Image (cartoon, coloured by chain):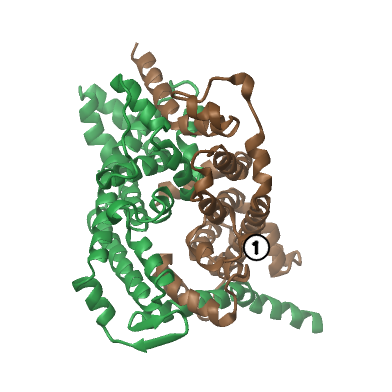
Chain colours: A green, B brown
Amino acid sequence: MNRDRWWRLQTRAAPYLFVSPFLVIFCVFMLYPLSRSLVLSFEKTIGPRHSAFVGLSNYRYLLGHDRLFGLALLNTAAYTVAFLALQIPMSLGLALLLNSRRILFRDLFRFSFFSSYLVGQVFVGVIFFQLFGPDGLINHAVSIVAGHRVVIPWLSSPNLVLPSVLIASLWLATGYGMVYFLAALQSVDPELYEAAEMDGAGNWQRFVHITLPGIRPMLGYVVLVGAIGGFQLFELPFVLLQGAGPNARGLTVVMYLFVMGFNTGDLGYASAIGWMLVVILLALTFIKFRFFRFGPESGN
Amino acid sequence: MRRVAIHLLLIGLAAVAVLPFVWLICASIKTPEDLLGSTLLPWGHLDHLTLDNFRMLRDQPFGRWVVNSIFLSSLHTVLVVTLSSLGGFALAKYEFAGKRVIMVIMLGTMLLPSQVLVPGSYELMYRLHWIDSYLAIIVPGAVSVFGIILFRQAMIGVPDELLQCGRLDGCSEWRLWWDIALPVVRPMIGAYTLLSFLAEWNSFLWPQIILQNEAKYTLPIGLNSLAGLPEYQHNYGVIMAATLVSILPVAVLFFVLQRDFVSGLASGAVKG
């Protein structure tokens, strides 16, 4: 019967129809540009029209001679390490404070810490540009604590660039990390705590021997997400410092990619920077799975 | 006693977390003089509240940018949720030629940062004459490897018996996706809708490269261009009003989808 044949046909064709829009766009707008980025990284280009094959010289220059790239790498790595060193304890601390049923207005607290995550990096940059101003909120707060008028040049002193970016990004991301830790804390078996209490374990011992192993997979995840996000840092310093900042201390790897590709116009060099970023992120992912490969089965 | 201390500590920390928002609101309803003369927060002169900052925004193409951002983010979200759930459904519930290859290539690209695509994509857009066109933002953004994998993972849990029943009842495969698979993963749709909208709303690098005509700017691009103008260095109430308006739609969407988001986030995260 005709209807039967049509029916069988639509059953057979369905999966192909369902994936084809995805697949076509994926191939044309992801795989193809990806391969072009790889080819471009071996070329010198002036805008999208003129290019010449230069072999490995983009990479050689990038790694051997380009002091700005070295600076960008250093800034980005310093930011990432400092960010994780502060964000992880702060997020975990907040989660521990909130992880009790006896806290009143828990949802309200959770939302007030998390809400900043909804604000995009660009908007955070615009807001903190004013907060860090000579007469901004932050200098006022410092003045009140110090007891006299203090004007800290947050955004114009090279050594204060990193702290300023950190303050703004911690405001943005601490509550986000907290949400993940709270979810992990709630999955730790409460009986373990009761048993430990009966054995006379103190707060600190319970934290080290029960809480930490219990949330270890989540810890690994939050660290990895933070590290990957850290190395991709761009919008926040770009808007906050209106560019690379004093002495280019706010220059990051992705900002350098943007500047080289779209201000200088060398798409080839920008691609090479992009592939260096790929190498860094793959290395970070590898390290994570090497050292945090503890699933639930190996945690006690 | 201890409980009181914890609550006081939490209130203090929450105050610090919320302070920039409070300041933002104060700054946008104050005159420039009140703003500069204020101490910690521009509380004073509560009789002096003004909507002038919002009125001044009308002299800028700001309203245009709000419309552009809402249009692009909504269209992006609808497209990416539809295509991801369709593709995820196929990958979760069907066996077909090439499925393994697709999965392996997708997972491979998931490890790559999106920025490495930018030079190659720009070259492609240049050849397609899509520079300064919304097509360059909408079309490549319509697919997300993360999204399709998310939906695949969620839809694996849809019982096969349910799908078979649907087929016996005469549902087309299309209807199975719409009437059976999608309702089962409803909380995840809410969470992913919020994430997609948020990502596009706040997106900066790619629109900054593609969009050149001021009338086509989105809010992040437009606001960044305003914030650098010297005439707003001392009259930043206008910029703050613009920022406030830029954050509000996302906050509204969050409140609408909050329940889905928290449950979706928690269920996805504990597995990871």
Question: Label 1 is placed on what type of residue?
Answer: Leu
- Taking the image as shown, residue A261 lies to the left or right of residue B197, namely left
Q: B41 or A176: which is nearer to us?
A: B41
**On the image, numbered disc 1 is attached to which residue?**
B163
Residue B166 picture quarter = bottom right
Q: Nearer the viewer, residue A111 or B102?
A: A111
Whether residue A226 sits left or right of residue B22 in the image: it is left
Q: Where is residue B220 in the image (x, y as percent from the top left)?
A: 54, 53
Q: Quadrant of the N terminus of chain A?
A: bottom right
In this rendering, is residue B59 above or below B106?
above
- Helix or strand or loop: what does disc 1 sit on? helix
Q: Report the residue at 31% width, 28% height from top.
A: A150
Is residue A28 visible in the rendered image? The answer is no
Q: Which residue is drawn at 29% across and 46% down?
A: A162
Chain under callout 1:
B
Q: Can residue A49 be seen in this view?
A: yes
